[in-house]
Image (spheres, rainbow, N blue to C red):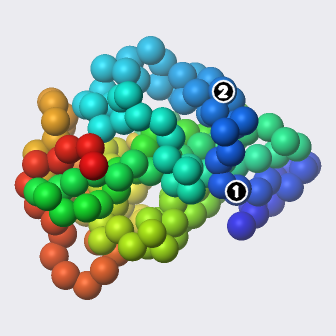
Amino acid sequence: VSAQASEDPVSVELERPGDAAAVEALVDAAFGPGRYAKTAERLREGRAPQPGLGFVALEAGGVIGTVRLWPILIGGTEACFLGPIAVEGGRRREGLGALLVERALDAAEAADFPAVLLVGDPYFTRFGFEKADVRMPGPVDPRRVLIKVLRDGEAPKGAVEPA
Ligand SMILES: CC(C)(COP(=O)(O)OP(=O)(O)OC[C@H]1O[C@@H](n2cnc3c(N)ncnc32)[C@H](O)[C@@H]1OP(=O)(O)O)[C@@H](O)C(=O)NCCC(=O)NCCS
């Protein structure tokens, strides 16, 4: 997958172990230290990024975008959680966020997850995310808890926990 950037081409690739430091720096810049206080972090803390479930937008070898997926349970049903997703401040609104979301959704589907959950704003409705009926492991604005079903059937409901 690639997007037309101003100069060098941008590609979206599987995250590799060597990308982790650049990914962390990008996420820190996007969210600040408050990122660790977010309820979504309860689904990630103490876990390493999952092989095959992280993607980076690369330009001239540098990481300018990131998205990760995490296996979770929703009411006992396996699913995955999307986040964090971030694009470098000077490179937003070029479609890179959309490329990263689409790639993550493809990966979730390929890995046979029935649904993808996230905490985010209305930006994500364009990808088919809808309001979820779940209980997150901490305080969160329920309007921001969104789910996309990847298979036929109803959206999983219930308590969300790390898988
Ligand atoms: C959210 C984010 C990843 C989107 O990346 P991006 O590369 O700018 O996304 P795209 O270029 O695919 O889409 C941009 C479009 O989405 C809209 N958009 C971007 N962020 C939005 C938001 N938070 N709420 C509503 N719309 C948003 C823009 O208005 C733009 O629409 P337009 O093209 O009609 O102007 C990026 O803005 C970012 O890193 N933000 C900071 C971190 C963050 O908030 N992450 C999401 C937390 S859930």
**In the rendered image, which residue does mark 2 sit on?**
21
Which of the 4 image quadrants contains residue 157? bottom left
**In the rendered image, which residue does mark 1 sit on?**
12
Counting other residues with Cα less than 10 Å from the Cα at mark 1, is it few (<14), some (14-19), or many (20 or more)?
A: many
Determine the secondary structure under disc 2. helix
Q: Position of residue 158 (x, y in %)?
A: 8, 55
91 with respect to 102 (left or right): right
Which of the 4 image quadrants contains residue 38? top left
Separation (CA) of disc 2 from disc 1: 17 Å
Q: Residue furthest right?
A: 7
Circles 2 and 1: CB atoms closer than 8 Å:
no
Query: Can the viewer see residue 98?
Result: no
45 with respect to 163 (left or right): right
Q: Residue at x 27, y 49 (%)?
A: 163
User: Which amino acid type corresponds to the residue marked 2 in the rendered image?
Assistant: Ala
Q: Is residue 162 above or below residue 44?
A: below
Which quadrant of the rendered structure holds the N terminus?
A: bottom right
Q: Nearer the viewer, residue 155 or 120?
A: 155
